[in-house]
Image: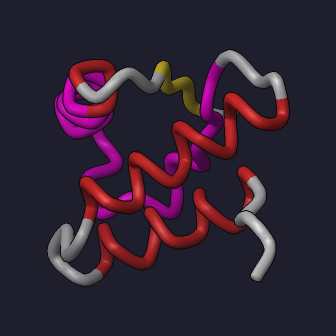
């Protein structure tokens, strides 16, 4: 079985967010490993795909991911 790409890990996180954060920590760990493997410094998320697409929701997500070692930014 191959390792998931950053895009696949990001999609898993979107699915987890839609499912009330089910297994979110495992998906963040997978994303962190994929970012490291691909040499990418930040994960980029589409804010339109988030359940809480407002400033406080995005800041909360950034803080939660930062605590787990993943830097997050949002696409325009």
- Residue at 50% x, 63% y is 49
In the rendered image, the quadrant that contains the C terminus is top right
How far across and down, in percent of the image, does residue 51 sit? 29, 63
User: 47 left or right of 61?
Assistant: right
In the rendered image, the quadrant that contains the N terminus is bottom right
Q: Is residue 59 above or below residue 27?
A: above
Q: Residue furthest front?
A: 1
What sort of colour scheme is used for the picture?
Answer: secondary structure
How far across and down, in percent of the image, does residue 24 sit? 27, 61
Q: Is residue 71 above or below residue 44?
A: above
How many numbered discs?
0
User: 71 left or right of 75?
Assistant: left
Q: Quadrant of residue 36?
A: top right
Residue 43 belongs to the span the image colors magenta: yes
How far across and down, in percent of the image, does residue 62 sit? 32, 26
- Residue at 32% x, 60% y is 26
- Residue at 51% x, 54% y is 30
Q: Is residue 40 above or below residue 49?
A: above
Residue 33 belongs to the span the image colors magenta: no
How far across and down, in percent of the image, does residue 60 sit? 18, 31
Q: Quadrant of residue 70?
A: top left
Q: Is residue 1 above or below residue 25?
A: below
User: Considering depth in this image, is 35 or 50 the residue closer to the camera?
Assistant: 35
Q: Quadrant of residue 5?
A: bottom right
- Residue at 37% x, 21% y is 69
- The stretch in magenta equals 42-64
User: Considering depth in this image, is 58 or 11 the residue closer to the camera?
Assistant: 11
């Amino acid at each position: 079985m191959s390792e998931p790409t950053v895009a696949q890990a990001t999609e898993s996180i979107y699915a987890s967010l839609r499912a009330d954060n089910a297994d979110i920590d495992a998906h963040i760990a997978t994303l962190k490993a994929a970012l490291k493997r691909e040499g990418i410094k930040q994960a980029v998320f589409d804010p339109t795909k988030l359940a809480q697409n407002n400033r406080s929701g995005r800041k909360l997500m950034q803080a939660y991911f930062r605590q787990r070692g993943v830097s997050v930014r949002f696409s325009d």
